[in-house]
Amino acid sequence: MYTINVTNESPSDTTFIIFQKPPQEAPDLHALAWKTSRLFSGQRSTVSWEKDYSFFSAQTGMISPGIVISPVSQVNASFPDANEVSLESDYQFSDPYSGLAESLAIR
């Protein structure tokens, strides 16, 4: 399990943001704000998570702030024998199979 503890030691209320680091730097690739939370002066927040790999597909249309995405298909992934899937008709995935080492891929 992974945990991040954040404490607002300033006299002002603030917002903290945890970003997902992009796998590579590219001008058209943007970091995902993974978690945001408002913290009052002196307040502490703890964020905990475990590694969990899955493939999700959804018909989203235009993505904008506040949009809620409902997955059409979800498949659990794991290393090394279930880390690749094929995208089939109607946004459905195949059963997972073994792909390149240390990567997740949709073919």
Image (cartoon, helix red, strand yellow):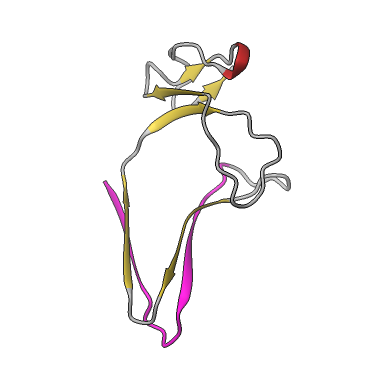
Residue furthest bottom in the image:
11
Residue drawn at x 48%, y 18% as measured from the top left: 84
Residue drawn at x 51%, y 29% as measured from the top left: 71
Residue drawn at x 40%, y 17% as measured from the top left: 82
Q: Is residue 40 left or right of residue 67?
A: left
When the figure is inspected, residue 62 is found, relative to residue 96, above or below; the finding is below
82 or 70: nearer the eye?
70
Residue furthest left in the image:
1
Residue drawn at x 53%, y 49% as measured from the top left: 21
> In which quadrant of the rendered image does the C terminus lie?
top right
Give coordinates of residue 81: x percent, y percent: 37, 16
When the figure is inspected, residue 11 is found, relative to residue 18, above or below; the finding is below
Q: Which residues are magenta?
A: 1-23
Give coordinates of residue 13: x percent, y percent: 45, 80
Give coordinates of residue 24: x percent, y percent: 60, 43
Q: Residue 97 sits in which quadrant?
A: top left
67 or 96: nearer the eye?
67
Q: Residue 92 sits in which quadrant?
A: top right
The answer to whether any part of residue 5 appears in the image is yes
The answer to whether any part of residue 103 appears in the image is no
When the figure is inspected, residue 71 is found, relative to residue 41, above or below; the finding is above
Q: Is residue 16 left or right of residue 52?
A: right
Give coordinates of residue 88: x percent, y percent: 59, 12
When the figure is inspected, residue 28 is found, relative to residue 16, above or below; the finding is above
Q: In the rendered structure, does residue 45 fall within the stretch colored magenta?
A: no
Q: In the rendered structure, does residue 8 fall within the stretch colored magenta?
A: yes
38 or 17: nearer the eye?
38
Q: How many marks?
A: 0
